[in-house]
Image (cartoon, rainbow, N blue to C red):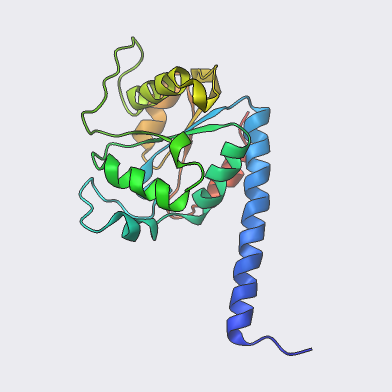
Amino acid sequence: NMPLTGTDQNGWAEEQRSKTMEKKCSAAVDKLVDCGINFLAIDFDQTMIDVHTGGRWKGTALELTEHMRPVFLHLVPAATNRNIRIAICTFSGQTKHIRDVTEYVFPNIADLIVIRGNDKTWEYHGNGFKRGKQEHIASAAEELLAEQALGVTDVTKATTLLIDDDPKNIRMSLKDRTRAIWFNPKEPNELLNNILLLK
């Protein structure tokens, strides 16, 4: 029985962390399903990634993938496997970069992820709330419902959850009767515990 070298131990520890994260994500997704949530609207800057690009990222999309938070690398595929749809809702106009990032990190499910950013490629004409991320969410939901291939027939405010690091967007969402969880950039894995507290 050979002793583990430092490199082996690091690899083992990394693998254990990954397994723990997978278990926690699986429990969080079970909770989302129990709560009737079938649509996650996730912010990009400082939420899905650990930097704030301000919509002015100068590097490549591949470089941006290095900033993806591990919690979302596990949560997004786990949710998608349970038929929960994902939209990235951002004030950034760099949606091409964001699309490329999803194709790098989620190659098997990127085409199921809807992206709504301030890129002037869409307008929301509904009579819903237009402040915060609400029109991004509503427009993404319209696309999900229109795309039969995405297999979603019943996205509503009651089945939606916003995850965002900006308290203003969380307040607007709650005011609009859409569930929301504030994402703490300093404690990214707290998100999973907060999902377990949903009612």
Q: Quadrant of the N terminus?
A: bottom right
Q: Nearer the viewer, residue 45 or 170?
A: 45
Image position of 124 with respect to 69: above or below: above
Report the front residue among 197 and 8.
8
Return the x and y of residue 114 as percentages of the image width and height. 40, 33
Q: Position of residue 141 (x, y in %)?
A: 43, 22
**Residue 65 occupies which quadrant of the picture?**
bottom left
Dividing the picture into quadrants, the one containing residue 186 is: bottom left
Q: Residue furthest bottom?
A: 2
Q: In which quarter of the image is the C terminus?
A: top right
Figure disc tally: 0
**7 vs 91: above or below:** below
Vertical position of residue 24 compared to residue 31: above or below: below
Q: Which of 160 and 122 is in front in this view?
A: 122
Return the x and y of residue 47 as percentages of the image width and height: 41, 46
Relative image position of residue 156 (x, y in whole percent):
50, 17
Q: Image height check: is 185 above or below 85? A: below
Question: Which residue is depicted at the point 41% across and 47% down?
Answer: 103
In the displayed image of the protein, which residue is found farthest to the top? 127
Q: Residue at x 49, y 54 (%)?
A: 187
Residue that protrudes farthest toward the right in the picture: 1
Tell whether 54 sits left or right of 105.
Answer: left
For the point 58% across and 38% down, the residue is 79
